[in-house]
Every structure is written in C-alpha cells, then in structure tokens.
Amino acid sequence: MEWYEELGFDENPFKKEVGMVGRKSLANEIFYHIEAGNITIVEGGEGAGKTELLKEVIRGYGGNGKVVYVSGKKFANGINIERLINKKYSFLGWLFNKNPRGMILLMDDVESLTETNCERLKYYFDQNYIRSIVFTTSNKEKINFTPSLYHRVRNSFKLEPLTEDEAVEIIKKRIGTLLPEQAVRKLFEDSNNNYRKFLKDCELHCRQLNLKEGAA
Amino acid sequence: MMTWYKKLGFFNNPFSIKPAPYSDELAGYDNVLREISFNILSGKVQFVLGSYGEGKTALLKRVINDFGGKKELIYFSCNRLDRGLDLESLLAGRYGLLGKLFSIKPKNMILLLDEAQCLTEEDYRAILRYKNSGYLRSVVLVGAAFDKGKFTPTPILMSLSGITADDSVRLVRERVGNISLLSNDSIKFIFENSNKNPRELLKNCEEICRYAVENSKGAVTKEIVAEALKLTDAAEEARKEPPKKFEHKKEDWSVYREVLKDGNRIAFGAEPKKEAPKSGPKIDSPKQEERADVPKPELLSVAKPQNKQPAVDARKQNLAPTVQEANTPLAEKELIEKNYY
C-alpha cells in the first residue's frame, strides 16, 4: 500500500491536477487577449504558476482543437514552427485553400527564440493562421525577440509568486485538513518562495504522518 | 464574459494589429501605393523605408493582392535567412510555404523582400544580377532601416513619413464604422497620444474602447482617454522598452533601436563594412548627444496629401549626378535617388 493509500487517497495528492488558485484577474486578461487576437507575454519565476495558467487556458477552450501548447525548451532547440502548424492539420490543408486559421499558440517557458522562428511566428500571426500567442518565460529580456515581432506584442504581465494564503489554499485542495494550517504556513515560510520545495516538504510531512499513525 | 467588441456588435476585435484584415484601403498611403505600383510596372528596384507599426507589411499585403493574382510574385522575409539569400532556391520555390503561394515562373518575377535591412551587400548584388538577367521584372525591398552603403547602386527610396490626423480617422472608421462611442475628435486625440504611429493608434483605441465599454461609458472623451491610457502605462512602458540584451549578429539592429527610443526619423544605417572611407559616405551610428547637431536629411515623402505629384516634384528637385553621390555626406539635405534601370 502506498503512503497516500493508507491515508485514504486514491492517488498521490501531490501529483494530481488541482487547477489554478488565485490569479483570476490575470487569467481573465489572458483570455481577453487571446480572444482579441493579441500577443502577450507572462513573466514569472519558477513555481509562480505559468504552466498552470496556460493549463487554465487549455481548460477554458475545452479541446476545440485550436489550442496548441508547446514547451519553450523544445522550441529553442530548433522546432520548426511551420512543421508545428502543419502537424495539426493535414498536408492538403497546408495548401492554403483549406487553410485552417485561428490557431491559439501557447509557448510555455520560452528561453530563447531563433530569428527564423521569430519571423515565422510573425508571418503566421500576420496572416491569421495563428490567432494569438501567449509566451511564458522567466525573463523576457533573454528571449531575443526580433524587433518586428516584439513590436507586435500587446502586453506583458508579471506573475507574482504565490502568496501564503494561496499556498495554503492549494494544499487544502490537495489534502484537505490532513496537515494543520499552522504547519503548512510554517513550511511555506521556510521554503522561501520556492514552490517546488514547499510541495516536497508538505509531501514529506504527510509521509511522516503516515508513519506516526501507528504510534498515535 | 462578453468581450467589449462583441457587446458593440463586432465579431472580431476591430482593432486587431494584423495588417489590414478589414479593408482594401490603406489610409494615408494612396500616394505611396501608386508610386510603388508605378515602379513595379516600370521594372524598377525600390526600397520602402518605415519604422515599426507604420504599415510596411500592410502595404506589402496590398501589393500582393494587386499583383499576385497573375502568380508572378515571390514574397520572402529576409530575417528568415540562415545563410545568404539564395535566389536560385527562392525562384525555384523551395522556400516552402511562402514560395508555394505563387507559381514558379522563372522569368519576369516580381520580388518582394520584407525585412530587407537584413540583406547583405552580396545579396543585393545578386538581386541586381538576377534582375539584369531577366529573371526578375521588378524588386520591392521593404525595411525598417536603410544602409546606403549596402544598397549601391541606390534603389528608388521611399520613406513612409507618417499619416495625418485625418488619415488616422479614416483608418479607424474603416474598422469600426460610425459608432458613437468614438468621435472623430477623440480619434485624433488618441492619435496624438500614440506617437502618430498607426499600430500604437490601434492598440490604444482597443485599450480605450475596452475601458469605456467595461466601465459603461457612453462616449470616449479626453478624460476617458487619459484614464484608460494611464492605467496601462505600467504595462505599456514594460512593453515599449526594446529588449536590452539584444545580441544580434547583424549590426543594423542597433540603429533602429535608436530610432525606436527617441522617435527620430533618421534611419540610415551603421558604419558600412566596406573599408573605403574616402569614397563611401561616412555613416555614423548617431549617438544620443550628437544627434542634435545632425540636420535631418529630407527623405522623399509621398504620404502628404497636399502634394499632388510629390514623387515627380521630388525627382525634379534631386537631379544629383551619379558620380558625386558616393561622396555626398548624409547630413546634406539631398535625396539621392538615381534610377539605374
């Protein structure tokens, strides 16, 4: 029996999807800009919730097929965006007459962009094959946008790190009241805004709970 | 959550910055378009110079619409180049998606090159060679910076010198029609506050209209403009700032970062690579402090409606002999425009 099964969970509560917490207004902004056909950048440190934000977008669009999610790391290593677009649609569709338009491109954790890819993005965006783009990154200065692409960026948002309350809420969503709130807050302080460390610590504590169970 | 434009009855964002998706009109650029078309039909090589957001891509799209029907066009964007411009492949249509749109007729093609500031001297000479051999009927180069040293012999140079306030009203009306939310005066006011840049204008209109609709204002007034723009100031500043660590191989990029930063319209390029300072024009990357001393060179401006035949007049004024061109310092108010073709 896994430790979480002993505690009554079906799956590891620290690995499952729980959705986004807080950030409602930012998510709404992003949804607006996607609808309006704009390019936006979301900047945030590690663990701030960039990927979660994009997942929220994917959930919001409910699998209607137009959202393409790409991890930026893969992208920097030479993914050809033309192939990316074409993969989504058939070869025949590629030949313009049946061209599909209005793709929503989510580029997660972008660290750098080649000139060629910048130019392709710009071209497809201008022609409306891509309806809108959301870039997330830890530092937009590093990305090396070409001036013509950068000039098209509509807005740039900063994703602040999670607050203590938000962190507490996330843990509650995951494990209910298994850990006392005080303990969770203490763990959050100790993690020093490192969300992954915070999660790991919480999980460790839960595992120890399990061991203590027998003694208690 | 209904978007503001849906509330007003629009299906899509009417202020989308994608180049001219809504109309055939390019407000303020009728003259430029005529000029460009004339030059294409006369088989010339021309360079259209304009900074970001002014409408270069929109112009190109229009040209493609006008001339592309007969499948005689090749469009390519030069900052996709990994190595030098490979005209052979371009002509054979091996540059993928874009080349595919236009069928491959090896002779008499019209070549449209976007981001032409990325071209090297060798590229330009190759273009001229292909032109002289009859593969290319006419060449249109479009870019954000023009380095005279690279493009020798000089093509016909046209600079987008901006649109007027009335043009800006036309531009916006094309997209939204006669809605009462925006008066012509408020459009002009927004235009003034957008550095007179068409793209900025569109972005600000979107911001302002969104603000007005979401806050249930009936009509956009100057106060509303100020409020809406102020709210996005922080975001705007963050966005307007060009990336600081911009390590691009091509030296030209630094020049139009300068252009972007202080809106100065000098866009001549950095020091040319050629080691012939005596014969080549001395082109210095203008520094902030020195800029005040350099009188702005007058570039051919065809976008002003008051000139009936601006292009022709400018040509009459500028019959500079060819030989002296190379030695003329940039600071002189002379349009170097010599037709070699």
Image (cartoon, grey):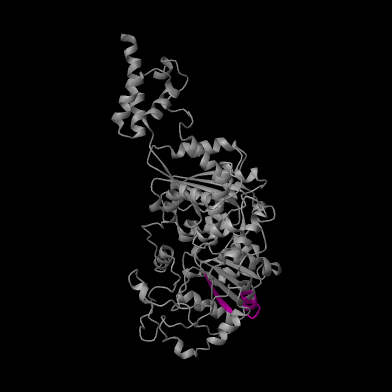
Taking the spot 32% from the left edge, 70% from the top edge, the residue there is B289
Quarter occupied by residue B314:
bottom right
Depicted B21 relative to depicted B326: above or below: above
Relative to residue B27, is residue B239 drawn left or right?
A: left
A129 and A158: which is toward the camera: A158
Depicted A10 relative to depicted B63: above or below: above
A65 and B163: which is toward the camera: B163
Q: What span is in magenta?
A: B35-49
Disc count in the image? 0
Give how far across and how far down residue A143 sits, in percent: 41, 53
**Residue B93 seen:** no
Residue A158 colored magenta? Answer: no
Q: Which quadrant holds the N terminus of chain A?
A: top left
Residue B38 colored magenta? Answer: yes
Depicted B62 relative to depicted B241: above or below: below
Q: Which quadrant holds the C terminus of chain A?
A: top left
A172 and A201: which is toward the camera: A172
Give how far across and how far down residue B111 sits, in percent: 59, 72
**Residue A213 seen:** yes
Give how far across and how far down residue A70 sits, in percent: 50, 45
Taking the spot 43% from the left edge, 83% from the top edge, the residue there is B332
A198 and B312: which is toward the camera: B312
